[in-house]
Image: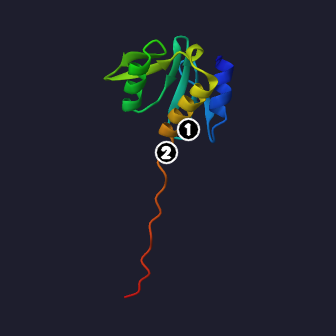
Amino acid sequence: MTADDIRAIALSFEGVREVDHWNRPAFRTARRIFAVIRPDGLWLHLPEERKEFLFAADAATFVKYMWGRHPEILVQPERVSKKELTALLREAYEHALPPPKRHRQRSSGSA
């Protein structure tokens, strides 16, 4: 998987735009960045429990590094299939979406 493959997948999701993040291509929803193409791998915004599962599953493919207080994940794109990378990008995208708007129900005013 190349940077162009990653870009095509990320930009296929609704409302995603590419932005510069410290001179690196990044992909964001209206809420936040969910993926950054780095020289050392693909950073993804995933829930903590999902990252821990991936670290345990294959530490060579899902590299753990510390940034602040939480472990971050760098996926080695050359070690995963297009199908798996698409699923991981979609998971990160969905995790970065704004929460759905809640509709308030009006009372009918009847007694």
Q: Are marks 1 and 2 in contact (CB under 8 Å)?
A: yes
Mark-to-mark CA distance, 1 and 2: 8 Å
Q: Which residue is at a point 44% across and 66% down the rendered structure image?
A: 104
Q: Is residue 107 above or below residue 89?
A: below
Q: Position of residue 87 (x, y in %)?
A: 56, 32
Residue most extreme to the bottom = 111
Residue 93, located in which quarter of the rendered image? Answer: top right
Q: Position of residue 18 (x, y in %)?
A: 62, 29
Residue most extreme to the left = 69
Q: Which residue is at a point 65% across and 30% down the rendered structure image?
A: 9
Q: Which residue is at a point 37% across and 31% down the rendered structure image?
A: 49
Q: Is residue 41 left or right of residue 111?
A: right
Frontmost residue, 82 versus 38: 82
Q: Is residue 98 above or below residue 4?
A: below
Classify 10 Å Cα crowding around label 1: few (below 14), some (14-19), many (20 and above).
some
Q: Is residue 101 visible?
A: yes
Residue most extreme to the front = 57
Frontmost residue, 85 versus 44: 85
Q: Amino acid at mark 2?
A: Pro
Q: Position of residue 22 (x, y in %)?
A: 53, 18
Q: Quadrant of the C terminus?
A: bottom left
Q: Return the residue at label 2.
A: 98
Q: Amino acid at mark 1?
A: Thr
Q: Quadrant of the N terminus?
A: top right
Q: Return the residue at label 1.
A: 29
| Picture mark count | 2
SS at mark 2?
loop
Say which label, 1 or 2, has the lower sequence index: 1
Q: Which residue is at a point 38% across and 20% down the rendered structure image?
A: 56
